[in-house]
Amino acid sequence: MILLADANILFDFGWVDQGLQHLAALGPLEVLENVRAEIREPDILQVLQDLEVTFVPLEDAWEADLREAKRGGLSLPDATCLVYARRSGRTVLTSERRLRERCQAENVEVHGSLWVVDQLYRQGQCESATLCRWLTR
């Protein structure tokens, strides 16, 4: 499973100790270029580069699909996540309710922060005390 992270999930895990490293350990991680542009925090960008996250450029061929996705009330970055995930079979990671609901409606696999925390616990990548601290931040 290749994971496609939106900006808010990167912020969620970028502010906790080693959060992005653990997120990337769940599987190959991709970030769309327009999502990357939303991230103004240099530390988060540096960690993503150090982890060799794949930054995916936008394609002109997505334009019609993007217009349709935006009509449903999604922002351009969220619409791009939906379109790319649908076209490529990626799993979307987001904390954004509207994007999660749209992905579910279109049968695009999608998960939020709690799923990530659960996976980290199940895979033994983080101790429960660490994960609980993350959830209370």
Image (tube, rainbow, N blue to C red):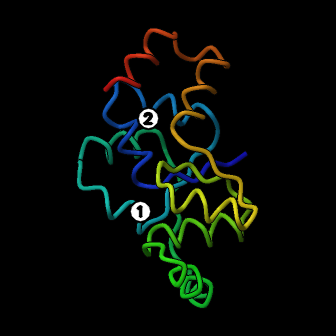
Cα gap from disc 2 to disc 1, whole angstroms = 15 Å
Q: Where is residue 120 in the image (x, y as percent from the top left)?
A: 59, 23
Q: Where is residue 108 in the image (x, y as percent from the top left)?
A: 71, 60
| Residue at mark 2 | 20
Q: Which mark is residue 76?
A: none
The quarter of the displayed image where residue 81 is located: bottom right
Q: Nearer the viewer, residue 130 or 60?
A: 130
Q: In the picture, which quadrant includes the N terminus?
A: top right
Q: In this view, does 109 lie to the left or right of 30?
A: right
| SS label for mark 2 | helix
Q: How many marks?
A: 2
Q: Where is residue 6 in the image (x, y as percent from the top left)?
A: 47, 55
The quarter of the displayed image where residue 63 is located: bottom right
| Residue at mark 1 | 35
| Residue at image point 40% right, 36% down | 13
Q: Which of 108 and 102 is in front in this view?
A: 102
Q: In this view, does 98 lie above or below 53?
A: below
Q: In this view, does 82 lie to the left or right of 5?
A: right
| Residue at image point 48% right, 76% down | 73
Q: In the picture, which quadrant includes the C terminus?
A: top left
| SS label for mark 1 | helix
Residue type for callout 2: Leu
| Residue at image point 60% right, 53% down | 92
Q: Nearer the viewer, residue 18 or 105?
A: 105
Q: Can you name the residue that lies furthest to the bottom here?
A: 64
| Residue at image point 53% right, 72% down | 80
Q: How crowded is mark 2: few (under 14 residues within 10 Å), some or many (20 or more)?
A: many
Residue type for callout 1: Val
Q: Is residue 8 left or right of residue 30?
A: left
Please report contact status of discs 2 and 1: CB closer than 8 Å, yes or no. no
Q: Where is residue 20 in the image (x, y as percent from the top left)?
A: 43, 35
Earlier sequence position, callout 2 versus callout 1: 2
